[in-house]
Amino acid sequence: MTADTQTTDTRATDAEVRAMVHRRYRRRRTAIVSLAAVLVVTAAALVGAGLVRANNTAPGKAPSRVPAGIAADKSGVAGSTGAVRVDVYLDYLCPECRRTERALTAALDGLRSHGGVSVVYHPVAFLDDRSTPAGYSTQAASAAACAADAGRFERYSAVLFSKQPAEQGPGLSEAQLIAAGRDAGITSASFARCVEDAPYRPWVRYVSDIAASRKVALTPTVTVAGRRVDVTGSDPGGALTHAVTAARR
């Protein structure tokens, strides 16, 4: 495959994922539109509020149960605190996310060692339709939230990426997700129960909706102080460090 052909294929895949995310998000808004239509019949005074809701892309209220170490806005897991915010949107089935996670680890460690950087990870489920059966992205993100309860979110994420299954195939099984916890240094029985019960699935949906409302339709997406950083080049770590340095000025 030539470089030009590979680039064309990547762009086509990106376009497909964007379309899939937007379709999924529109389906949720369509449900609100349908509710508004019923309200038109029963109480015309409520039509305006219904239409405002239908056109508002803001997600609903965060679920009552969220993992430990959550960011203040509940949209992700906080890996550190500081004045400059770095947001990392990832999907555990995304091959490019695996590459980016590895490429950014050293840069993030260096930035945090100097203080002043707040890193927030957003595990989204954009690629649920690309596993067989569907749903691996949500399952893996829910397990990662269980790892956050054990204080091992980043280490567990690294293990998941090292064991990443191929798209269009089966994801890691429940037993494999639990075993990945042991590889990340998690030995508590509560982690295994959490993976099995998957209480954080609603939170993963919420995180995905928050991301979509912020116009994030592809993973990986990295922002620094709200501005996107291109981490697809030959030096993702350098690009991130430059963006953080600029934001500190």
Image (tube, helix red, strand yellow):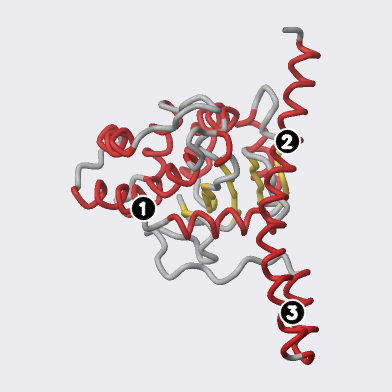
Q: Earlier in the sequence, mark 2 or mark 3?
A: 2
> Is residue 121 toward the left or the right of residue 84 in the image?
left
Residue furthest top as drawn: 1
Badge 1 crowding class, 10 Å Cα cut-off, few under 14, some 14 to 19, many 20 or more, is: some
**Which percent across, then down, holds residue 206?**
55, 60
Of tags 1 and 3, the one toward the viewer is 3
Check the image and report above or below for 183 versus 21.
above
Q: Which mark is residue 50?
A: 3
**Which percent across, then down, holds residue 171?**
44, 32
- Check disc 3 and give the amino acid type: Gly
Badge 3 crowding class, 10 Å Cα cut-off, few under 14, some 14 to 19, many 20 or more, is: many
Check the image and report above or below for 132 versus 123.
above
The quadrant of the picture occupied by the N terminus is top right
* Residue that numbered label 2 is attached to: 16
Q: Which mark is residue 113?
A: none
Badge 2 crowding class, 10 Å Cα cut-off, few under 14, some 14 to 19, many 20 or more, is: few
What residue is at 73 percent from the left and 77 percent from the top? Answer: 36
- Check disc 2 and give the amino acid type: Glu
**Which percent across, then down, holds residue 141?**
45, 46
Determine the secondary structure under disc 3.
Answer: helix
Determine the secondary structure under disc 1.
Answer: loop
* Residue that numbered label 1 is attached to: 198
**Which percent across, then down, holds residue 131?**
52, 33
Q: Quadrant of residue 53?
A: bottom right
- Check disc 1 and give the amino acid type: Ala
Q: CA distance from mark 1 to mark 3?
A: 33 Å
Determine the secondary structure under disc 2.
Answer: helix
What residue is at 72 percent from the left and 57 percent from the top? Answer: 26
